[in-house]
Amino acid sequence: VAQRPARVLSGGEQQRVALARAWALAPRILFLDEPTTSLDPAASREVERIIADIAAGGTKIVMITHHLGQARRLADDIVFMHDGCITEHTPADQFFRQPQSPEGDAFLKGELP
């Protein structure tokens, strides 16, 4: 795989290459926007494992996701936004157990318009 150009790799392989390139710079903070969009479940799990490894190495991860399961698995804190405004910033376990904003509660129930 190392000999092939990145453009001919699968989506999951391309995403792993992108994460490796970013991680190689040893950033203090890594911003990720929907890093597993369009990936199959196996590729998503591998990308999540890499993200967890990066975080375990001391890099702070700031990630945008609409995937509740992914947020439960990876997040320490949740910053919930609605209509461009932060409506809640709380530890992840508290957010999923008892959201503090009506918007967060509605989102978790699948009722947010």
Image (cartoon, rainbow, N blue to C red):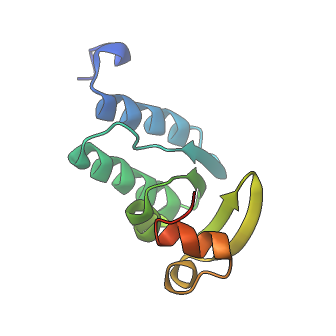
From the top left corner, tell me how far across and down residue 61 is, in percent.
Answer: 58, 56
Q: How many labels does the image show?
A: 0
Name the residue rendered at 78%, 57% in the picture: 85
From the top left corner, tell me how far across and down residue 103 is, in percent.
Answer: 64, 69
Q: Is residue 25 above or below residue 78?
A: above
Front residue (pair 58, 35): 35
Q: In this view, does 101 lie above or below 10?
A: below
Front residue (pair 113, 61): 113
Name the residue rendered at 57%, 76% in the picture: 105
Front residue (pair 10, 108): 108
Q: In which quarter of the image is residue 81?
A: bottom right
Name the residue rendered at 46%, 39% in the picture: 19
Q: In which quarter of the image is residue 40?
A: top left
From the top left corner, tell me how far across and down residue 66 is, in percent.
Answer: 49, 54
The C terminus lies in quadrant: bottom right
Decide if residue 111 is in sight here: yes
